[in-house]
Image (tube, rainbow, N blue to C red):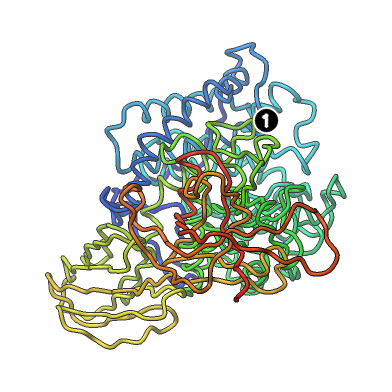
Amino acid sequence: MTQQKLSHTVPAAPGLQEAAGPVAPTPAALSALRPLGLGQARLRAEGLLGRWRRRNAEDTLPHCVDNLHTAGNIGNLRAAAGESEDEFAGMWFADSDVHKTLEAAAWQLATSPEDDGLRSFVDDTTALLARAQREDGYLNSYFTVVAPQERWAKPDWSHELYCAGHLFQAAVAAARTGVSPDLLPVARRFADLLVERFGPDGVEEVCGHPEVETALAELYRLTGHRPYLDLAQRFLDLRGRGLLGHGRFGPRYYQDHQPVREVREVTGHAVRQLYLLAGMVDVAVETGDLALLDAAERLWADAFRSRTYVTGAHGSRHREEAYGDPYELPSDRAYGETCAAIASFQWNWRLLLATGRARYADEMERVLYNAVAAAVSSDGRHFFYSNPLQLRTGHASSGEEAASRRLPWYSCACCPPNIARLMASLPGYLATADDGGLQIHLYGDASLTAPGGRRVEMRTAYPWQGRIELEVAEGGGGGQAWTLALRVPAWCDTYTVSVGGEPVRVPARDGYVRLTRVWTPGTTVVLDLDMPVRQVTAHPRVDAVRGCVALTRGPLVYCLEQADLPPGTVLEDVRLDPAVEVTAARREDLPDIPVVITAGGLVAHAGDSLYTAGARRERTGTPLTLTAVPYFLWGNRSEGPMRVWIPVAAAG
């Protein structure tokens, strides 16, 4: 098919060292921090984060590519290109999974250029997308093949702009990494069509599934083409006018019930809400709209004050995949969609860049190590869509979205490629730099290079241990002092710092220890975070877990699994014995779990009657030792009951 000529120049691909990651505020943006380039942050495979990224490259990404073929996503695009007469397969927004996998491949190829199979996928799929694109720039296989008469007709449910947004993000990744020069022209043809249709004096419409807003902002950051940013802002300004109608779940489901600068609480479909918030921050910092940024921070306070799980998961209702009422956080019915966890990570990263506040890095860490990490199996090829905090004895799986075990793929397969793109781009979220120095937000075995020739080697067994060792390998030229800022997580009450082997007393300020000096190569810095086991309780308004505790250590939330209980013990009958010390330990029969938590337990017997008159009294049986494992590892040994929140036995 003949394509329209692109009227814009394509940015030259930078060297890897300078290549920006997924979020790259412009120099004029109101951002407190600037991310390191892709070549400036490198994870080593010795650490947990590095192993996750390697597993993603070796297992998850190839698995996603294979399933795009077998599930029909690639076939849909071939049909749109007129190269196949096969029936459309999968969800009507199936193209978005192709785009997310392309984005993941681009980030991965930036540091693994020798992966010929992945490169072929990028080249072949990019060429296919170009052939499937319509003359006017439109690109969506469902509305090209199945329902061309409904193009743009169902903004509440079509996901047309959502799919476009993921295409734009894939193109940004391909351009920034230099992996493919051909995807950006495809994306820009579509983006130009959106500007023509929805721009100033155009159709007043928004997408029922926000995502295009943050994608348009990033496309602007890459190209400098202001109409993309203006369109993102226009979509935000139009939201809240009820343009999407009532629909099946009402306007709150779409976040279309109130203007974005006036909303006081997070509502509706959790993924949509979080993607919308990410876009709000992107547009706010690029346009200087402080009211928009204030609204995003206000909604952050609402979400994390009363609507977020201890694992960092979002969304407490299976119906609508939505946020619930304040403190409505049931464990066994937690929805906690994987995509919502990833969206929370992305939103918090943007807020961190905008403000420099440590609380956003704390949330990135919590959701990454718990809600995100739990969604993918140890083999990298099985996934959870929803992430409950309790799986009851006798649980009957009610379909893909309430599975009792990770599945290899889904009919709505949004989560696996979303995991793939986050893990592939993970090095880009470790640290930031500014004129004053280097700030480290996430700890892992890594090499970090900041502008000005400052290079730091980081070694750590985090999150299993709290000791982070850093060596200033290059101090930067000119003999100028600069500041190395190290985050002290909110969960840590006690820590020590040494420089060159000498203890230093530096109080954390705004969540960071800041060390300022003229650094010479070879200088060592050690931050040692104390990691005691903590017994966390929820606010008493969280009715579902009243009288329970969650066991945590460092950033990790732990859980009990049936696999660690004596035969015949019912997990729901187990109580934590408050008289027995809770400790961190290593179990030789669990070599893949460096640290478990051991606690005293009691088995309660409350009789067989479902209801009884008066207060029910429990009888406790033989004491037992409880072993809690990291929540992100649950369900890898065997299928069975699990719980994060453990009831505490009554004293005496």
Image location (x, y in percent) of residue 498: 22, 80
Image location (x, y in percent) of residue 254: 76, 52
Image quadrant in which the N terminus is located: top right
> What residue do we see at 27% from left, 48% from top?
45
Q: Looking at the image, which is closer to me, 315 or 632?
A: 632
530 vs 190: above or below: below
| Relative horizontal placement of residue 556, taking residue 86 as reference (left or right) | left
Image quadrant in which the C terminus is located: bottom right
482 vs 40: above or below: below
Neighbour tally class for label 1: few under 14, some 14-19, many 20 plus, Cα within 10 Å: some
| Relative horizontal placement of residue 297, taking residue 597 as reference (left or right) | right
639 vs 71: above or below: below
The residue labelled by disc 1 is 91
| Relative horizontal placement of residue 165, taking residue 482 as reference (left or right) | right
Is there any visible trace of residue 227 in the rendered image? no
Image location (x, y in percent) of residue 349: 49, 62
Q: Looking at the image, which is closer to me, 149 or 454?
A: 454
> What residue do we see at 62% from left, 46% from top?
386
Is there any visible trace of residue 195 in the rendered image? yes
| Relative horizontal placement of residue 41, taking residue 284 as reference (left or right) | left
In which quadrant of the rendered view does residue 510 lie?
Answer: bottom left
> What residue do we see at 40% from left, 66% from top?
34
Q: What residue type is labelled 1?
A: Met
393 vs 124: above or below: below
Q: Looking at the image, which is closer to me, 520 or 374?
A: 374
| Residue lying at the far top of the rendered structure | 85
